[in-house]
Amino acid sequence: MSKENKIGPKISRLRELRGMKQEALASALGVSQQTVSNMERSVEIEEDLLAQVAQILGVTPEAIQNFSEEAVFNFFNSFHDSSSNNGAIYAPGCNFNPLDKLIESHEENKKLYERLLEAEKSKVEYLERLLKKDN
């Protein structure tokens, strides 16, 4: 089976495009980094896990399933020089400034970081309670 038909490499590439490390995805999923590594080599994954991964990456499960690196490059390569409009990109029905998307992505990453931090704090509190209970 070609790489394009495997769901794992698509997840891996989307994660990388979002600037996320395997460890961050693992923590958000509540699994080990090795589990994420194995998942990213898989041909298929369970539907509910795909939905969780999609939510964490800020995309739909369908976006992961249909992801094509070639389509992404073709999309961006289809635009002409946009320097005359201060970096805004125009396509029929689509008008956005890449800086806005960068800021939006940063805000999403910040929210994810905050959720991960809260999860880690909860784990520490739980472990501290266990230690006190044992002593």
Image (cartoon, rainbow, N blue to C red):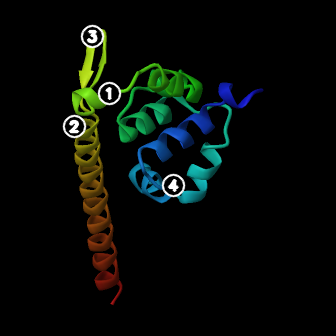
User: Image point 24% across, 31% down: which residue?
Assistant: 97
Q: Quadrant of the C terminus?
A: bottom left
Q: Is residue 12 left or right of residue 125?
A: right
Q: Nearer the viewer, residue 81 or 11?
A: 81
Judged by depth in the image, the label closer to the viewer, 4 or 2, is: 2
Indicate the amino acid at tag 4. Gln
Q: Position of residue 20 (x, y in %)?
A: 43, 52
Q: CA distance from mark 3 to mark 4?
A: 35 Å
- The residue pinned by badge 1 equals 82
Q: Nearer the viewer, residue 83 or 41?
A: 83
Indicate the amino acid at tag 1. Ser
CB-based contact (under 8 Å), mark 4 and mark 2: no
Q: CA distance from mark 1 to mark 3?
A: 17 Å
Q: CA distance from mark 1 to mark 4?
A: 34 Å
What is the number of the mark on residue 22?
4
Q: Is residue 97 above or below residue 93?
A: below
User: Image point 54% across, 40% down: which residue?
Assistant: 13
Question: Outermost residue, front direction?
Answer: 84
What is the number of the mark on residue 93?
3
Crowding near pointer 2: few (<14 within 10 Å), some, many (20+)?
A: few
